[in-house]
Every structure is written in C-alpha cells, then in structure tokens.
C-alpha cells in the first residue's frame, strides 16, 4: 500500500456522519422532478394537453357538412345548393381554426414546461422529517442520554456503540484497539478524557452531563484527531505520513496538485432530498466561498461527464464504511483529496433558511468542501468553518481567518 492510500485508509477509519431529521423535496407544489436531477416533466404531463388529430377533423367534416346542409335546407326552405354554399363557407374557417389549435396547443405544451420549471427555482428550501425506518427512529441523543452517569467498571449495553463513535472520530490512540466488549474500561476512560480535552470540558474521564451534552451537538462525521497509520520508527513511509498541526487549523499530506486547481463537480443519484436547483445554488455559493481565497475554480461538469467531485445524499449505510445515523449527530462527511466524494445525511432536517430544529445546508457544504480540499478539523476556533460541530438553526457560511490561514498554508506553493 502506498503512503497516500495508507493514510487515506487511516483517516477514513476515524469518522462519520450522524443523525438528523430528514428532508423532503422542497417546492412540492411545483414541477419538481420525482427523482434525479433530470429536468424532464413527470410522466403524464403531456397527456394532459391532448392534440386533436387531423384525421378526426376531416371525418367530422365529411359527416357533419352534408347532414347539417340537408337539415338546414329543409328547415329554412332554401334551395339545397344555396345552403351548400353557405355551409362550405362556414366550414372552411372552422376546420382551419381546428388546425390552428393543433399548433396552438402543441406550442402551449412546449411553452408551459419551461415556465413551470422556472417557477421551481425557488432558492428557499425548508425540509421536513422523512418517515424513518424503525431502526432509525431512536435518535442518537436519546441513546446518549441513556449512558449518562455510567461508571468505570460497569458493563452496560450501548457502551460498545459509544466506543465505536469515539474511535471513528479519532479519540482512540490506535486503530489497533479492537472494540468488542460493553465494559467501561481504561481505553474508554482515556478516550473520554481526550474528547473532553478537545472540547475544553472538565477532564474527568466520566460520562458526565456536560460530556453527553457536547456529544449531542450535530457535527461533521469526519474525525477530530487524525491518527497516523501505525507508525513504525524505521518505516520508509512514516516521514510522509506526518501531518502538520499549526495552532488551530490542520491538514495532512493529501492535496490537489496544481494541475487540478480547476475542479469540476456533479450531483450523484443518491437520495433526492433537496430540489436540484436549490442544491445547485447552495453548492455554487459554497464553492465560491473557497474559490475567493484559494487557487481553485469550481465548475459543474457537463451532463454525463465525469467530475472530480461528486455530491449526493445518503441514508444510513451507503457502502463507504461510514454509515449515516438517522436524524441528529452526524450531518455529512467528505473525503480528502483526491477522492472527491461529498455525502450528506439524507435523514437530517435540511434547510436553506433553518429554523431551530433544522440544519443549514450551505454552512455544512462550505465545511465539507474544506475537507475535499484537504483541511482537517480546526480545534480551538468555534467560529471557524472547519470546527467540527454546528448548532441546529445556525448559519455559518463565511470563512474565519483560521480557515483562510489553513487553506493558504496548505496551498502555499
Ligand atoms: Zn468535518
Ligand atoms: Zn458516505
């Protein structure tokens, strides 16, 4: 395994997403595509505007004209030939209008589709909870509350999940520690102390109230502490696996080469949570936030083309070893260069204008793009985009000086 792959593997071992309220497509009253980002109207749309056939009009004419001519002739006592002339004069414009309407209706159909789609480009998006599968109904918060006060030495169901949570976030000193038991052991105590130190809590090593409260704050699923791959003192790769911690921001060795500073992105076909136009707008803004302070440009790839960055929503286990956790806790994750995957938890309650129980989509997107570019979590600056947590209802879309310093340091040459 080369050094990049080794480090990547180690980093990814450490983390992942959380739980939060799910979201539904916004603008449901509009022509929102049912799936994918296709702008095609839904099945049956054109059927609602039937186009009369010319054959039908001709048949009608051939039957109606002679019949009506005969009846009018008898009723009015006019000569049959006179009535024929009158009826033919009237019928020509009627049939002609029919033809015109064929064109007219077809035009209306074509015109209506783009108008309706334009109407769906409403940038404001308010999510709402999806119907969850039973296994996702218990929130991570209620799970944590059940563990408050558990003491060292106790064996309690659920502790193994807590250990896995802390390990994925990097709070175990080594990936070699296997987590197989539900007892409150020395390793868990040490991991809790490290966690408490990271978030400036009282370092007690206990599952006290403030620690549980901190764990309940929604956060990014990427690790806070990057454990270097089991460094062997004489390993020829260990030197390359060192990472640089500069005061607050942090990054490793993974970065995009100058030949890849013009990055492309596309939207994958995962769970459809946010309208395609809304997501495009949010991501465009978030990419611009980083483009202003870095050498990067970001452009959406043309349809069907491959892209450096792929953005999509997933629910629960989605095949990358970092399953999402339903509503709450882990909100999203993104892989370090040059992987390019950015995943949102589809079960969060996303919004572009968040209420107190919602998560701001753009704030999380700006954070995750920081990972896509190679930044790790920033430890001591809660105002930084790269800080690992974000409170519900909060908008944090602007880079802090710490973020700018970090991206400048990472791409300084
Ligand atoms: Zn993160
Ligand atoms: Zn994922």
Image (cartoon, grey):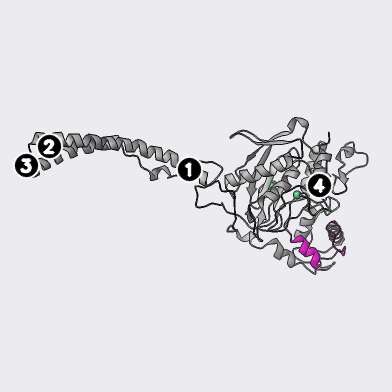
**SS label for mark 4:** helix
* Nearer to the camera, 166 or 248: 248
| Residue designated by label 3 | 77
Label located before the other in sequence (1 or 4): 1
* Percent of width and height locating residue 301: 63, 35
Answer with left or right where residue 346 lies relative to residue 198: left
| Residue designated by label 2 | 83
| Residue designated by label 4 | 401
- Residue 317 visible to an observer of this rendering: no
Q: Please report the residue visible at 67 percent of the width from the left and 44 percent of the height from the top.
A: 285
Find the distance from the CA under tag 3 to the CA under tag 4.
Answer: 96 Å
Label located before the other in sequence (3 or 4): 3
Label located before the other in sequence (3 or 2): 3
Label located before the other in sequence (4 or 2): 2
* Percent of width and height locating residue 299: 66, 36
Determine the image quadrant of residue 311: top right
| Residue designated by label 1 | 115
């Amino acid at each position: 395994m080369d050094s990049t792959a080794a480090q990547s593997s180690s980093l990814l071992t450490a983390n992942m997403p959380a739980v939060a309220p799910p979201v539904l497509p916004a603008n449901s009253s509009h022509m929102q595509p049912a799936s994918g980002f296709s702008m095609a109207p839904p099945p049956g749309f054109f059927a609602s505007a039937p186009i009369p056939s010319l054959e039908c009009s001709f048949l009608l004419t051939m039957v109606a004209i002679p019949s009506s001519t005969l009846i009018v002739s008898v009723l009015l006592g006019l000569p049959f030939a006179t009535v024929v002339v009158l009826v033919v004069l009237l019928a020509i414009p009627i049939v002609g209008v029919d033809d015109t309407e064929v064109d007219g209706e077809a035009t209306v159909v074509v015109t209506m589709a783009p108008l309706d789609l334009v109407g769906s480009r409403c940038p404001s998006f308010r999510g709402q909870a999806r119907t969850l599968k039973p296994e996702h109904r218990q929130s991570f918060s209620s799970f944590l509350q059940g563990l408050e006060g558990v003491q060292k030495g106790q064996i309690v169901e659920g502790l193994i999940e807590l250990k896995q949570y802390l390990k994925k976030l990097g709070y175990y000193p080594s990936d070699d520690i296997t987590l197989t038991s539900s007892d409150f052991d020395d390793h868990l105590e040490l991991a809790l102390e490290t966690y408490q130190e990271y978030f400036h809590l009282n370092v007690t090593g206990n599952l006290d109230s403030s620690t549980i409260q901190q764990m309940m704050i929604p956060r990014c699923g990427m690790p806070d502490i990057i454990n270097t791959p089991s460094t062997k003192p004489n390993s020829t790769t260990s030197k390359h696996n060192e990472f640089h911690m500069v005061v607050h921001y942090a990054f490793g060795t993974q970065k995009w080469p100058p030949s890849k500073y013009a990055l492309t992105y596309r939207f994958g076909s995962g769970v459809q949570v946010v309208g395609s136009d809304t997501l495009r707008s949010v991501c465009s803004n978030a990419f611009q936030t980083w483009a202003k302070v870095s050498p990067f440009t970001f452009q959406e790839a043309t349809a069907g083309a491959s892209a450096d960055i792929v953005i999509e929503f997933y629910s629960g286990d989605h095949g990358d070893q970092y399953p999402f956790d339903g509503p709450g806790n882990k909100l999203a994750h993104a892989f370090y260069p040059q992987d390019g995957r950015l995943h949102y938890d589809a079960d969060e309650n996303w919004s572009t204008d968040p209420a107190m129980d919602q998560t701001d989509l753009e704030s999380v997107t700006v954070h995750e793009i920081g990972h896509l570019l190679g930044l790790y979590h920033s430890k001591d600056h809660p105002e930084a985009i790269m800080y690992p947590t974000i409170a519900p209802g909060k908008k944090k879309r602007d880079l802090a000086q710490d973020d700018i310093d970090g991206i400048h340091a990472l791409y300084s040459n």
